Image: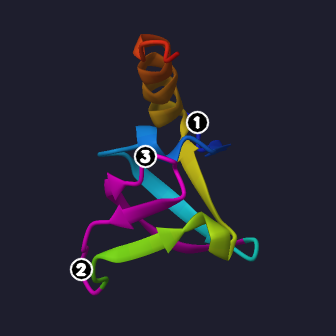
Amino acid sequence: MSDKRYRTEDWNQLLGFNVDVHHDGRIARTGTIIEASPDSNAIWLAADGVWERTLIHRAEDYKIWIDEEHLTKLETRLKAKPAQG
């Protein structure tokens, strides 16, 4: 599997995914998403080791990156998502 990472805007579709959280062009944190706002503007990362449960806000210019395996899972989720309207 490739080490390539992909930026995603679909934060609310990433529950259970391991992600890299970037801020100012650097990895600020890695972790597993345990909650997400319906509008994809905020996520909660699970506590892990020395890291406490952490709230990440899109408005604070955080970016979420996923690996190729999770990209494939995300694409499957998005295809299976029923149309709204």
Q: Which residue is mark 1?
A: 2
N-terminal-most mark, 2 or 3: 3
Between 25 and 37, the one nearer to me in the picture: 37
User: Is residue 74 depicted above or below 80 in this figure?
Assistant: below
Real-space Cα separation, disc 3 to disc 1, in angstroms: 30 Å
Element under disc 1: loop
Identified at 42% across, 22% down, the residue is 77
Residue 67 lies, in percent from the top left, at: 53, 42
Crowding at dot 1, Cα within 10 Å, few <14 / some 14-19 / many 20+, comes out as few
Q: Is residue 20 above or below residue 51?
A: above
- Which circle's residue, 3 or 1, is located before the other in the chain? 1
Residue 1 visible here:
no
Q: Is residue 51 magenta?
A: no
Determine which residue is flagged by label 3: 38
24 on left or right of 55: right
Q: Which range of residues does the magenta coloring cover?
A: 26-50
